[in-house]
Amino acid sequence: MATRVSILGATGSIGRSTADILCSNRDRFEVEAVAGGRDAAALADMAIRLGARFAAISDEAALPALREALAGSGVAAAAGEGAVMEAALRPADIVVAAIVGAAGVRPTHAAVQAGRTVALANKESLVCAGYAFMRDAREAGATLLPMDSEHNAIFQALGRHRPDEIEQMIVTASGGPFRTWPAERIAVARREEALAHPNWSMGAKITIDSASLMNKGLELIEAHHIFSVAPEALGVVVHPQSIVHGLVSFSDGAVVAGLAVPDMRVPIAHCLGFPDRLGTSARRLDLAAIARLDFEKPDLVRFPALRLAIEALRAGAGAPTVLNAANEIAVEAFLAGAIRFGDMATLTETILQRFGDARESGVTESVEAALALDAEVRAATASVMSTAWKSTY
């Protein structure tokens, strides 16, 4: 019997790579639903190509265009938040959760509460509401498969080892386009420079987070929840080749690493086929051709976003929720040209200080409480930005 798959965030980079894997393994999979944001043409094309039963677009204004593009295909269409939730809850064996940002938390949580197997590429679900999210997953009997390349590498490296055998988990960072830049130049980096990632082709938000190293901090928070590892046992190493994606150190001194070329089809295929292996057309790793692998400590002075994320992880409670919400608004502002690159960390730190009492809040009690704090932080961040950063750069 074919495995039924639904894709949330189908038109993003993860969604497109997932579609490539599904198309290469048509005999093994059926597509129940695809959900996207605003691009009706791309969503309709994917739904038809994959033979999906249902297509949901979050932008209600795009529904007429989606229906027109799907005319005669037999694919049902709907729009709005409720439609995306329906896509998450339709009868699927695996839900690929790849909606970017906090917008993906509710539909991903809905799939978890329904007891689905969730291939998790929406790290914000755990950054924003990790404690409640993981509790609800356990209670519902849901299975979480980490789809981010770093967490997937760690997942594979762990094997069947017991938690008490683990000493440290390391996620790697390419260092982004500014790895060797001085702090003064990073602070005024232009939009196009920040979007020029040396190794990965990703959406704008995650690419900016990778340039600031905020993405590595978010990944540490995600790893803390998904692997139940103490904050002090988590770390980051800068690895410019992006060949080693994650490492696990064990109590006997052994270190197991997950290696692959920087291609998201590798972890996606692992999640879709788990516990079996699916073939992919990803380029094969040739260590002799690469010749060298370099590793460096991250510079928390030149990249303060990573420092802020580590501090939020250690603070716990609502601090990661505040961090994530403030950072999302800051990244949007930078992409819009409203603030400079260096202002993103400054703005985020200002908001973290303002919401210092979130460390004692009840945000860990439920996903809805976390999302309420998220909304409050977003409003406060926008307000601070409008008064403190009035210039256009």
Image: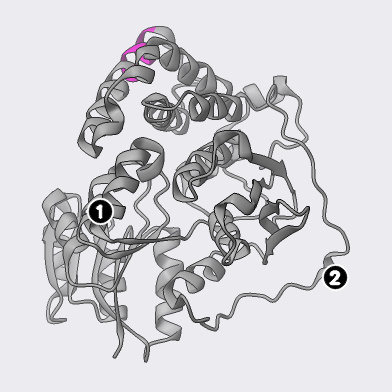
Q: Residue at x 46, y 34 (%)?
A: 335
Left or right: where does residue 186 sit relative to residue 278?
right
Q: Which residues are magenta?
A: 381-387
- Mark 2 lies on a secondary structure that is helix
Q: Magenta includes 3?
A: no
Left or right: where does residue 384 sit relative to residue 181?
left
**Res 306 → quadrant:** top right
Query: Which residue is situated farthest in the top direction here?
Result: 387
- Mark 1 lies on a secondary structure that is helix
Between 239 and 160, which is closer to the camera in this rendering?
Answer: 160
How many other residues sit within 10 Å of disc 1, few (<14), some (14-19) or many (≥20)? few
The percent coordinates of residue 341 (x first, y second) are 56, 26
Single out the mark in the foreground, 2 or 1.
Answer: 1
Residue 289: numbered disc: 2
How many other residues sit within 10 Å of disc 2, few (<14), some (14-19) or many (≥20)? few
Three-letter amino acid code at the position of disc 2? Ala
Q: Residue at x 67, y 53 (%)?
A: 248
Q: Residue at x 45, y 78 (%)?
A: 273
Q: Can residue 11 be spotted in the picture?
A: yes
Q: Earlier in the sequence, mark 2 or mark 1?
A: 1
Left or right: where does residue 120 sit relative to residue 371?
right
Judged by its main secondary structure, the magenta piece is: helix
The residue indicated by pointer 1 is 139
Q: Can residue 37 be spotted in the picture?
A: no
Between 188 and 265, which is closer to the camera in this rendering?
Answer: 265
